[in-house]
Amino acid sequence: MKRSCLPKCRLSRILGWLQIALGGLVIIVSITSLLRFYYAGFFLHNEDICRQFYPLKKDFYVADKDAYEGFDIVALSDRVGEVLDKMESLQQKLELVVQQMEKSKEVLDKTTITKLEHKKYLEEEVIRPLYNAHIALRQIRLPKLEGLRNQTMKEDPLINDFITEEIRKYITPKENRVGKKNIYRTEKIFNTIGHSCVLYKKELEQYMDYDIGSYCDDDWNLAQKLMLNGCDPLPRRRYLTRASKVYQKPYPINESLWKLPDDRNVRWGNYQCRNFQCLSSKNPKRGYTKCTGCFEMEKEKLKWVTNSSLPVDFLISDALTIKRGEIRIGLDFGVGTGTFAARMRERNVTIISTALNLGAPFNEMIALRGLIPLYVTLNQRLPFFDNTMDLIHTAGFLDGWIDLLLLDFILFDWDRILRPGGLLWIDRFFCKRQDLDDFMYMFLQFRYKKHKWAISLKSKDEVYLSALLEKPPRAI
Ligand SMILES: *[C@@H]1O[C@H](CO)[C@@H](O)[C@H](O)[C@H]1NC(C)=O
Ligand SMILES: *[C@@H]1O[C@H](CO)[C@@H](O)[C@H](O)[C@H]1NC(C)=O
Ligand SMILES: *[C@@H]1O[C@H](CO)[C@@H](O)[C@H](O)[C@H]1NC(C)=O
Ligand SMILES: *[C@@H]1O[C@H](CO)[C@@H](O)[C@H](O)[C@H]1NC(C)=O
């Protein structure tokens, strides 16, 4: 009896379960679409809404017909164009009024304070919001009619990892206007983002929680943390950065190179110190450990120009005589306040100094000295073309902590940008004695010509290595 019933019973039981499962699925789908609708907001442009609802390519094809059924895009596009025109003319009118008020400022000052207030009111409460609305409206990209029917969504897969609208907007590929293709036949521009941004989603979404076009908090330290952790380059672009309220004009170049900058030109909020004097190595509460003493000009003045007791300290004059007159541009890769670049500048050599603000305003210091700071992390392929640099100098950053594979990526990148006949100056690289062989192999693998090579003891079990190497011409 039981046996004969079995197939039928099983079938109906399976159908029952299937119904329950389907019911559950429907509920889940409705909840998630509601949530997505909520996140999509009202001001997302249509493409975004579609992506929010139909993130999968397959679905998109099926869905786009329904989504736009009975929806007159041409009319919408016309209306938007009309609003844009109106806003533009209104904005021009208002700005004209403000300009006229500006012209008659002296009169304004003396006569009526209310008019001044009126002007301020116009600027802040009317023109700026109007302008923002104008820009926002302009940036809406309505789906193109032909695009709709021929949508081959090639969106960045990372996009679905983020909810914050501004991150999604940043990642979304931007189509060239009027379907133009560039010389590589691409019709879209992709903004880039570090893949490890996904790992630091919480911090990134906190960092990206800002009002477009407005002043952001002075949170570069959070940005630097993200960058150093591989979320680099960062997607926050549409904000105004804060600056020192009492910024002074910089010292002239004949003074700025060897003088501590004006304290008022740095925002100190994220540093332990509040002025340059405080950054002295004598101060135990200076807040940084890399390149201690780099903010003391008396010490800096001795570097690379005075003989030291250690054979690993080469002089700039020695390096330049190897290639007399040939060294004109280069990169100083390390942690420092730009002293190498300053000395080279005195010899008419232009050096770009990489810098991270690790507890002290290294970038600001280099720039205020009148030199070029380059704010890059180790993660980045250097923004220089192949075979372009006459010199790469490195001191103070790379040492025995570095993973050999990471070092390999960095060294090959340096080799790429160094021109044939260019010099690689490894300055006081240090590591444990037992690791020296590994690192020596890393530096020697490129078969550069050895002009100088020196090893000194740093401590009982640590050594310094300095080398001055020349990239050979390559016949390939
Ligand atoms: C769709 O786009 C492809 C390439 O972008 C193009 O070759 C094709 O002609 C388009 N189809 C229609 C129907 O527009
Ligand atoms: C720097 O140059 C300016 C003019 O170019 C000159 O007036 C000034 O005295 C110079 N300062 C120093 C310290 O040489
Ligand atoms: C460094 O020492 C060498 C010889 O040891 C000498 O020729 C050179 O002039 C010295 N340079 C400086 C800057 O003192
Ligand atoms: C640098 O260039 C200036 C101007 O061309 C020249 O007067 C000066 O002697 C040069 N300095 C060096 C060290 O070559």
Image (cartoon, rainbow, N blue to C red):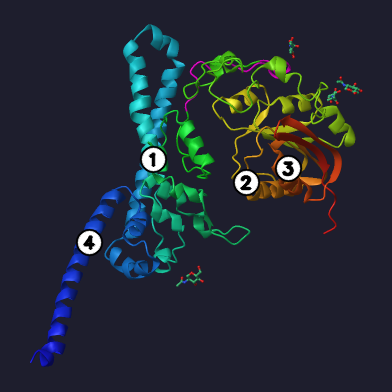
Residue 249 at what x, y percent from top left?
60, 17
Mark 2 lies on residue: 403
Between marks 1 and 3 in the image, the one whose residue lies nearer the viewer = 3
Which quadrant of the rendered structure holds the N terminus? bottom left
Secondary structure under tag 2 reads loop
Residue 320 at what x, y percent from top left?
85, 32
Secondary structure under tag 3 reads helix
Mark 1 lies on residue: 134
Asked if residue 254 is among those painted magenta in the image, a careful observer would answer yes
Mark 4 lies on residue: 28
| Front one among 1 and 38 | 1
Between marks 2 and 4 in the image, the one whose residue lies nearer the viewer = 2
Magenta region, residue range: 242-259
Q: CA distance from mark 1 to mark 3?
A: 61 Å
Mark 1, Cα crowd under 10 Å, few <14 / some 14-19 / many 20+, is some
Asked if residue 20 is among those painted magenta in the image, a careful observer would answer no
In the current view of this chain or complex, which residue is farthest to the front?
Answer: 460
Between marks 2 and 3 in the image, the one whose residue lies nearer the viewer = 3
In primary-sequence order, the first of circles 4 and 1 is 4
In primary-sequence order, the first of circles 2 and 1 is 1
Amino acid marked by disc 1: His
Amino acid marked by disc 4: Ile
Point out which mark residue 436 bears: 3
Residue 22 at what x, y percent from top left?
20, 70
